[in-house]
Amino acid sequence: MPRDGSGTYNLPALNPVITGTTISIDWANTTINDIATALTNSLSIDGSVTAAKLATDAITTVKITNLSVTTAKLAANAVTADKLATDAVTTDKILDGSVTPAKIFNGAATLTGTILPFAKNTPPSGWLKCNGAAVNRTTYAALFAAIGTTFGVGDGSTTFNLPDIRGEFVRGWDDGRGVDSGRAFGSTQAYEVDSHTHTASSGTNSVSHTHAISITSSNESATHTHSISMTSGINSVSHTHAFSDTTSSDGAHTHTFSTVQGGISERGTTDPYKSALTLEGTHTTSAAGAHSHTVSGTTGTNSATHTHLLSGASNTHSTTHTHLFTDTSTDESATHTHTVTVDATGGAETRPRNIALLYCIKT
């Protein structure tokens, strides 16, 4: 039974139905067969709607009532990749502005197992926090099928663990490239600083100068003395030195002296009766026994720049003690440097500037 362009069915030609007319069996069977064929071609059965059955531009907006395509009209998983030809849904098939967030079920276009950061501290519907929690394998069967036990086996039978990205930076898996070799997929990695050195140098000293030294000796626990040998500081102005000492004793001794012929008189007199005649020759004094002589006085003035050489020994020290030595180093007249120790700096980890967001995984 043919149908015209408006969709109206018409009776077959040469078989008019007239009131009061008896319908013959041949005519009735033919008509019924036409109706059956028309119904078969009109009703959708499994596999009946094919590309050959749809004329080009057959499905238009006027053929679909507003809001008529709802989730209740579509069986679960009815629209699958194998139902759509490659490149079937193109931009020219979708009216501008018709696909809006409100028209798409939350998360419908996101693959299970996708991880994204969110600018809020709670996960959206259909997502779970990436906090390492153990979740049920049956409740989240699709997610378990996608990631398995990569991030933890849970209790080993009914649960599995989610990735834990709290406080972590995400790094692309090396996958054989060799930049981060030896890493298992989904494994964590501790922070590390690349091996490096630091160059440090003190300022160069190119002029003559000295360095102050202050050192304490180690403990001297035995009775001992210290030898002293040094040169005094330079005295550049005229001065004298006072001295007072006793000569050493040479024991009993005499002194030899020589005279010439003449008179020896009492000191300070010219009385000839108090004078005596001496003969020329060598004479010896009587022995005076062991004795020493006390000497004191002042040296002559030293007007030239000079130093004094000192030598001797310190008093004996019988107790444990140390010695503080303070001096000045020799003159450093050549260009030289000094060893420098570089102190550590920084915090507990190495990190770039960052912002904290909530990572979630699609269930």
Image (cartoon, rainbow, N blue to C red):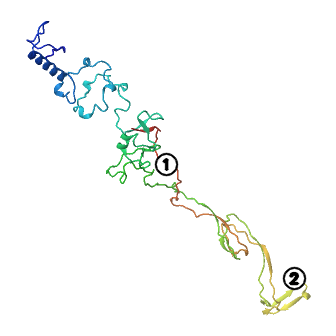
| Placement of 133 over or under 226, stated as above or below | above
Q: Residue at x 78, y 85 (%)?
A: 249
Q: Which of 41 and 162 is in front in this view?
A: 41
Residue 40 visible in this rendered orientation of the protein: yes
* Residue under numbered circle 2: 267
Density class for disc 1 (Cα within 10 Å; few <14, some 14-19, many ≥20) is: few
Q: Residue 265 falls in which quadrant of the image? A: bottom right
Residue 104 percent coordinates (x, y)? 35, 28
Residue 21 percent coordinates (x, y)? 11, 8
- Tell me the amino acid under the disc marked 2: Arg
Name the side, left or right, on which 248 lies relative to 12.
right
Label 1 vs 2, first from the N-terminus:
2
Residue 233 percent coordinates (x, y)? 66, 66
* Residue under numbered circle 1: 349
Foreground mark, 1 or 2, reads 1
Q: Which of 284 and 244 is in front in this view?
A: 244
Residue 233 visible in this rendered orientation of the protein: no
Name the side, left or right, on which 64 lies relative to 323.
left
Residue 339 percent coordinates (x, y)? 52, 59
**Distance of label 1 from label 2 (alpha carbons):** 105 Å
